[in-house]
Image (cartoon, grey):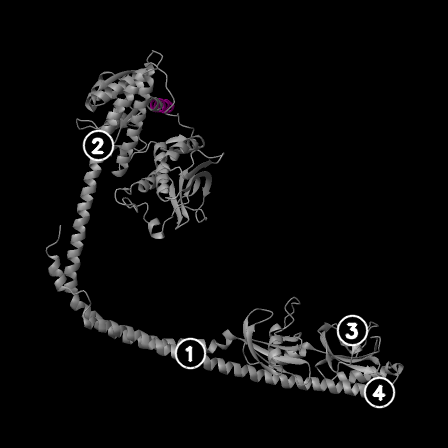
Amino acid sequence: MSNPTAPALRSVQPDAAPLTIRLHRLLLAVTVLVPALLFLGAAWQNHDDVLREGRDTIERTVAIQREHALKVFDTIELVLARIDEHIAGLSWDEIGAPRTSDFLHSLKQPLDQIVSIWITDADGVVRAGSQPWDTSQHSDRDFFSVQKERDAGLYISRPFVGRATNIASFAASRRRSTADGHFDGTLHVAVSPQYFERVFSEIAPPLSHVASLVRADGEVLALEPHHADENIQRQSLGLIAAVATSPAGGTYSRSSDYDGRQRFFAYRKVGPYPLYVRFGVEESVLLGRWYSNMALYGIVAAIASLTLLLTAWLALRRAHAEQEALTRLRTESAQRQRTEERLRQAEKMEALGQLTGGVAHDFNNLLLIVAGNAEIAQASAGADISPRLDAILRAAARGGSLTRQLLAFSRQQMLNPVVVDLRTRLPGLAEVLSSSLRGDIDLSVDVAPDLWRVEIDVAELEFALMNIALNARDAMPDGGSFRVISHNVVLREGSSESVADLAGDYVAIACSDTGTGMSSQTMQRIFEPFFTTKEVDKGTGLGLSRVYGFTQQSGGGVTVESTPGSGTSITLYLPRSTKPLTIDPRQPIGEGSGDAVGRVLLVEDNPEVGQVSSAMLGRLGYEVTLVERADQALDVLAADDGYDLVLSDVVMPGGMTGLDLARELRRLYRDLPVILMSGYSDAVRSVGAEFTLVTKPFSMATLHEALSRTRSRQEETS
């Protein structure tokens, strides 16, 4: 039904915001964007300035390091020249005299950068030194072996620990040759890396840095800060790459070879020597001052922006206030219209629910009459009539399934949980599921051999699996496969297999297909009642919502995984049961022995239902008294309290329901067992665990099991 006021409301409120509101919104955006752009521009400029100043500092520092290192190695060159001049023309015996060692000691004494000075012969044997030494040779050292092979000039060795001094060092060596050019030993000075590290520390600016003295091949001779770990990278790969491009010196940026931190490096070649000095600072340290500046700039920009923003917001608020009266009228009208529509829909669904619930209740009584009489007749039927009675019982069972669907639609479903072994039940469903699928769909049912027992409504489980199979069939128009896999699972909160708030032992039944899959939007709504992606008249949207309700009522849950084009997997989680298996309701029950096993007071207002129920009880060996109302039952018990059990319908005339009767009997006759029966009633929802409930229509086996269980429980508590 249309709303006659809607056109008038649309004429009052324009579709677009007034120009003034749009201008105020633009002003709001400007008050944020302009300070932000100014801040970004200043940040960019300051970033470049800070980096440039930091890199200038690094390059000045490495220049100072170079000058110092150059003077040190020039001094070492002079020392080696003095030694060569001092021993020129002397024999090895004369060189080995104490006065030569005293001379070497006097040269070494004032020079902190020198650890020791040595003279070795052509065999690598030390002949003179600046301090006492052992008789070991130096022929295994690279500063000796390289000079022996060729005249390498001033050769800078790899780092080593001196045998005589036990001090970390590296050597600067020169070759001695005979008059005819043959190798005649070496002169070498052991240089202290710690000396360079100390000087680098004094020269460096107050920044977290790395300074090093490196051979041309990348071997690190001195490193500050000092690292005692011998496993760190002792070769500067970054410097090697930079020197290949610019041998004299330059800058580069890369992660450090020994700690992986990103640094900006400057390097310089130390004069004519095969050495480089290098100085680097982490880029985050260089940007430290920039971060401080940005904090200050940000505060200023934020204050300015907030001031402008507040002004613009106040102006916009005033403009909005002028429009609120008009928009409120339209909003309230639209809300009223939506509320009325929802109310009409709710009333329609409620009426339909009441109708289906009432129909299901009455239909259950009819099914009980049909199935009960057929079951009673089957016990004495001949071979020619027994198949027809079987057909009647099967039809009654299908009718019971139909009533459950009606009750599920009206949200009045009652479960009849029994403890079952799915290892025997699930394989038997393969034939039923196969009939729901097409011939081009492969079906497989895999059951774990150690599958736990569960306490569920078996009919609801069968419906759930069949509904999932039907949906899978529709999702595989060109064929595919449908698999049902069951296994035990222990759910823990926070685990990868966790399901909602479930935790503990569960049996998981996973139903997977290779169909078209679902989008994430569809997956979010598939359990909503009446939601369906099928064409009109192809589906009601109630099937999966009933599956969801069944798992929830059973104390479990359900999950869905799906990818468009890759299929869907729906997994039911049912809680493990440690109770003994329930007697199979399909198991045939023999007739009574002829002697009454007890007296039953049957309360049923429907005469035909009463008659068939009495007949069932009689065949089970009970003596039955039938009354139609609860007050009549109270009168009978007041006159004769020798009854062993009361079996009562829930919905009855006279003002007192079966549940009211049961509670009154508990008060008056505490030891008298009471069983309630119903196809459907709102009162049944409040029964809970108070009394045993038998759902109509029921078989003789179901009735027998309920009677036996109730009387046994009563005897245990007596």
Q: Position of residue 105 (x, y in %)?
A: 79, 82
Residue located at (18% from left, 39% from top)? 351
Residue at image mark 1: 44
Q: Type of residue at label 2?
A: Val
Residue at image mark 3: 164
Q: Is residue 54 magenta?
A: no
Q: Are marks 1 and 3 in contact (CB under 8 Å)?
A: no
| Circle 4 crowding by C-alpha within 10 Å: few under 14, some 14–19, many from 20 | few
Secondary element at image label 3: loop
- C-alpha separation, residue under disc 2 versus residue under disc 3: 109 Å
| Circle 2 crowding by C-alpha within 10 Å: few under 14, some 14–19, many from 20 | some
Mark 2 or mark 1, whichever is nearer to me? 2
**Which residues fall within the magenta stretch?**
706-718
Mark 3 or mark 4, whichever is nearer to me? 4
Residue at image mark 4: 88
Q: Earlier in the sequence, mark 2 or mark 3?
A: 3
- C-alpha separation, residue under disc 2 versus residue under disc 1: 77 Å
Q: Type of residue at label 1?
A: Trp
Secondary element at image label 4: loop
Q: Are marks 1 and 4 in contact (CB under 8 Å)?
A: no
Indicate left or right for 30 with 247 as reference: left
- C-alpha separation, residue under disc 3 versus residue under disc 4: 26 Å
Secondary element at image label 1: helix
Residue at image mark 2: 359
Q: Earlier in the sequence, mark 3 or mark 4?
A: 4
Q: Position of residue 522 (x, y in %)?
A: 33, 50
Secondary element at image label 2: helix
